[in-house]
Image: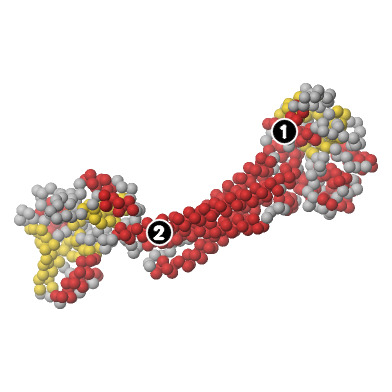
Amino acid sequence: MIQTIYLRDVLPEVFADDTRAPRPSDVWLQSGLRLERGRRYLVEAESGTGKSSLCSFIYGNRHDYRGQILFDTTDTRTLDTTAWCGLRCRALALLPQEMRLFAELTVAENIALKNGLTDFRSEQEIRRMLEELEVDHKYCQRAGLLSIGQQQRVALVRALCQPFDFLLLDEPVSHLDERNNRAAAAMVQREADAQGAAIVATSVGNHLALTDYTTLHL
Amino acid sequence: MKSYTNTLVRRLMRHNVSTPQIAGYALASLVGLAIVLAAMQFYRDASGLFAGGDSGILRHDYLVLSKQVAIGSGATAFTADEIADLESQPWAEAAGAFTASRFKASLGVDFAGRGMSTETFFESIPDEFFDSLPSDWSFDPSEGEMADVPIVVSRDYLALYNFGFAATRGLPTLREGEIGMIPLRLYLRGSDGSTLRMRAHIAGFSSRINTIAVPQQFMDWANARLAPGSAAAGPSRLVVKTNTPGDPAIAAYMRRHSLDIAGDKIDNGTAAYFLRVATGAVAAIGAIISALAFFVLMLSIFLLLQKNRDKLHQLMLLGYSPSQAARPYVMLIAAVNTAVLIAAIIAVAAAQLLWKPMLEAVGAPTASLWPTVCAGVALMAAVSAINIACVRRIINKDF
């Protein structure tokens, strides 16, 4: 279980060579930024300031940064492939900005691909969650045929099909209307609270309708 | 649930599998492997003709050597140094010396009341150089002159007697089995005038040793009794066991040292050598085809991995380990290679059926298929292991 994620002087490599004066940021180059389990964070950013990079650094699929990211006392650079696979099934959940659903598989199969790995939810639970986000009727349809907004909701349900300490949501509602945004936020907060987990949501404009959260400017 | 996700992963990863590419690999690999295994099997089958000198039709692995004789030339005996040099050659496994008798001998027979005798000589060689030893091939010195001495004669001598001598003299022809029953009188005369009268019989025939042979123990005993003072000269003939029959190095050595080989054994040996070279060349061609097929497979798998790279990455983002993601490819490689192996073994078995009657016609029983099957399994296991290791490495690198 990860209690705290520390970011120590973290800066994407691409920004390190930038000759312009550094913009003030609550995240980059902070000497001791702590993200704690049980809390909610909204990372507000303009596009191109590295919010997807931040999610990738924490999720371990990119390492092109300076500084240190620690899970409690463990430097994430010391984790091997097996450790990362384990964390991605038990401690870290990610909704990528591009959703990354498999277009040739159905909604049901896309979710089963994750849930089969974790055995975390029953099919009834999954269908109830899809129903809550009003995409239940697409259950047997190929993901590639769904609209972007529908894909976003399916990908969100998939991300919730695992136990987690930190839920990383990269622009989770960029293609959702106000009503769907509220439904998604309600579900995310409920599930995170049930596990005592933290939510880290990024946004370039359309914020996930979280309540009681800390804003971090990137 | 687990098998369902495995099915899903397999469906995803096999999406870009090109059937013609895989079929092309399978075919090329099958041809290569079948050639390699068939060459191996043929070599093992055909070498029945050459190996084990006693049973094969080309007895090549024992050579009887002597120095070339020229008129007026002196010593034809081998010195200890020359024997040692011969034994140190890579193709020579062992060398045995012919021991000559240092006494005069005559053999007599009583034939329906008529007595007949002839001057003769004897030689002996160590027992292990005989092609077939008679069961009573021994001499006990404690029995002394009471012993019945077994004699082995070159099979050629019997033919000379039957077809050359007996016919013109009105004597009966003899068969190998009968001749041993004829009691012979042996009369030995030493240089000092001492004599020995003993019984003897023909105990067997040899195709390898072109002489009249007696047991080594008898020769040593008789030489000591009848020529006590004279020192043994070096042997003038040697029998050499070779482990690489037909090796051109043997003929070259003989030329260099002016040695003669009894019979045409060196030519027969060349046939064995040619078999080895020919099957080696065929196996090499098969190996090259196999290697090319191996690269075709690696190439098509690299292409496949390249095409499915995003999907692999997505799976690993979901928490799949590289080995889980690689599983469909591992299964694919294992399945294709197993099919190729089975087909190649069937092909070799079929080919063996084709050449079996031909080899059996010249007296070579075909060898078992199992060593070839084992070699095929080992080869394919190694190829698959390398394939799979490469796939794992590439996927790991993408993590």
- Element carrying mark 1: loop
In the image, B367: left or right of B199? right
Image quarter of residue A82? top right
Image quarter of residue B150? bottom left
Q: Give, as a three-letter code, the residue at label 1.
A: His
Chain letter belonging to callout 1: A
In the image, B206: left or right of A166? left
Percent of width and height locating residue B218: 17, 56
Task: Name the disc covering residue B77, or none.
Answer: none
Residue at 48% x, 67% y is B353
Q: How is the image coloured?
A: secondary structure
In the image, B197: left or right of B274? left
CA gap, disc 2 to disc 1?
61 Å
Image quarter of residue A96? top right
In the image, A44: left or right of B333? right
Q: Nearer the viewer, residue A51 or B99?
A: A51
Q: Is residue B183 above or below residue B66?
A: below
Residue at 88% x, 37% y is A189
Residue at 37% x, 56% y is B273
Q: Is residue A96 above or below residue B307?
A: above
Disc 1 residue crowd, few under 14, some 14–19, many 20+, Cα 10 Å: some
Percent of width and height locating residue B290: 54, 54
- Element carrying mark 2: helix
Q: Nearer the viewer, residue B333 or B115?
A: B333
Q: Which residue is mark 1?
A: A63
Chain letter belonging to callout 2: B
Q: Which residue is mark 2?
A: B275
